[in-house]
Image (cartoon, rainbow, N blue to C red):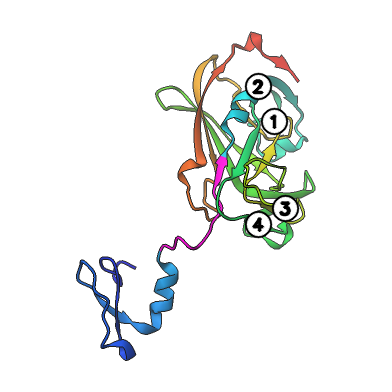
C-alpha cells in the first residue's frame, strides 16, 4: 500500500494520463484499473462500524470470590476453564459488553460461522472463539493467573444507551445492536478466573474483549480495562 500511495493523494495514468491530483507531496502514478481497490482500502469516515466496550461499573460491582469443588467430568474441567479437578479458588465477575458504535455488530447463525464458532459436545451448543481474555497481575505487572471468557450467545440483552435502536439479535442469529448490551453473568460456567494458589492481596485484573480482533470495530482502544481488586485470604472465602 505504501508503495502505491505517497502523501495525501494519488495520480492516474492510462486513460487518465493527462490528469494528476496535486497535494503537498510528490505522488507516484498508479494504474486507473486499481483505483476502486485503493479507494476501498483508504480510511473512510462514511463506513460505519460497531464499537465494543466494557461496562466497568457492572464489573466492579459483581466481583466475588468463592471456592468450588469440580469433578473430572464437569464441562468446566473438560474445556479448560480451570486448571484441574478438585477444589478451586475462583474470582467471579459479570462482564457486560456494550456496542457504543455507529453500526450493529452482526455475527449471524453460529452453525454457518465455523471461522469463529466451534461446537462444544459437553455443553451441546456452539462456543465463540476469543470473546474476552482475563489476566490477574501483581502491581508490578507480573501475571499470576489468566483465563478466557466462555462466549456462546452474543445477543441484545437490554438497551444500554439512549440512542439504542430496536433490538433484533438472539442466540440463533447472534450480534449486538447499536446501543445494546450483552451480559454474561458470573453465575454461568467459565465466567471466572481460576486463582487457586494466589495469595491474598491487591492485584490488577485486566479484561480485554475482542482480543484477536475477530470483529471489525471503529475503535479498539476501549477494549481493555484494568481493575484494582483485592483477593481475600482463603479463610475469608466461602463455597458455592
Q: Secondary structure at mark 2?
A: strand
Q: Secondary structure at mark 3?
A: loop
Q: Residue 165 or 212: which is nearer the viewer?
A: 165
Residue 87 x/y as whole percent:
70, 21
| Type of secondary structure dominating the magenta stretch | loop
Q: Earlier in the sequence, mark 4 or mark 2?
A: 2
Horizontal side of 194 relative to 136 (left or right) equals right
Cα–Cα gap, marks 4 and 2: 31 Å
Placement of 216 over or under 64, stated as above or below: below
Q: Residue 113 or 171: which is nearer the viewer?
A: 171
Residue 229 shows up from this direction:
yes
Quarter occupied by residue 221: top left
Residue 75 x/y as whole percent:
75, 38
Residue 145 x/y as whole percent:
54, 29
Horizontal side of 220 relative to 73 (left or right) equals left
Check if mark 1's residue and mark 2's residue have beta carbons within 8 Å.
yes
Q: On the image, numbered disc 4 is attached to which residue?
A: 107
Residue furthest to the bottom in view is 15
Picture residue at 30% right of the left edge, 66% below the top: 2
Horizontal side of 133 relative to 109 (left or right) equals left
Q: On the image, numbered disc 2 is attached to which residue?
A: 64
Cα–Cα gap, marks 1 and 4: 23 Å
Label of residue 186 in the image: 1
Amino acid at each position: 500500500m505504501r508503495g502505491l500511495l505517497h502523501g495525501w493523494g494519488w495520480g492516474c495514468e492510462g486513460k487518465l494520463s493527462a490528469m494528476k491530483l496535486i497535494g503537498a507531496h510528490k505522488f507516484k502514478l498508479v494504474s486507473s484499473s486499481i483505483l476502486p481497490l485503493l479507494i476501498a482500502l483508504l480510511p473512510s469516515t462514511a463506513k460505519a462500524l460497531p464499537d465494543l466496550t466494557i461496562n466497568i461499573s457492572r464489573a466492579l460491582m459483581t466481583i466475588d470470590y468463592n471456592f468450588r469443588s469440580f469433578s473430572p467430568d464437569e464441562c468446566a474441567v473438560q474445556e479448560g476453564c480451570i486448571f484441574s479437578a478438585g477444589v478451586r479458588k475462583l474470582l467471579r465477575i459479570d462482564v457486560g459488553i456494550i456496542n457504543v458504535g455507529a453500526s450493529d455488530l452482526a455475527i449471524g447463525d453460529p452453525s454457518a460461522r465455523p471461522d469463529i464458532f466451534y461446537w462444544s459436545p459437553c455443553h451441546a451448543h456452539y462456543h465463540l472463539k476469543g470473546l474476552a481474555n482475563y489476566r490477574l497481575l501483581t502491581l508490578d505487572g507480573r501475571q499470576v493467573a489468566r483465563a478466557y471468557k466462555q462466549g456462546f450467545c452474543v445477543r441484545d440483552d437490554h438497551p444500554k444507551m439512549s440512542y439504542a435502536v430496536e433490538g433484533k439479535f438472539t442466540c440463533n442469529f447472534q450480534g449486538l445492536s447499536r446501543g445494546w448490551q450483552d451480559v454474561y453473568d458470573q453465575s454461568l460456567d467459565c465466567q471466572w478466573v481460576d486463582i487457586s494458589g494466589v495469595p491474598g492481596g491487591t492485584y490488577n485484573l485486566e479484561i480485554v474483549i475482542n482480543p484477536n480482533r475477530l470483529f471489525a470495530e471503529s475503535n479498539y482502544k476501549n477494549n481493555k480495562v484494568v481493575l484494582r481488586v483485592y483477593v481475600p485470604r482463603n479463610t475469608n472465602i466461602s463455597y458455592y
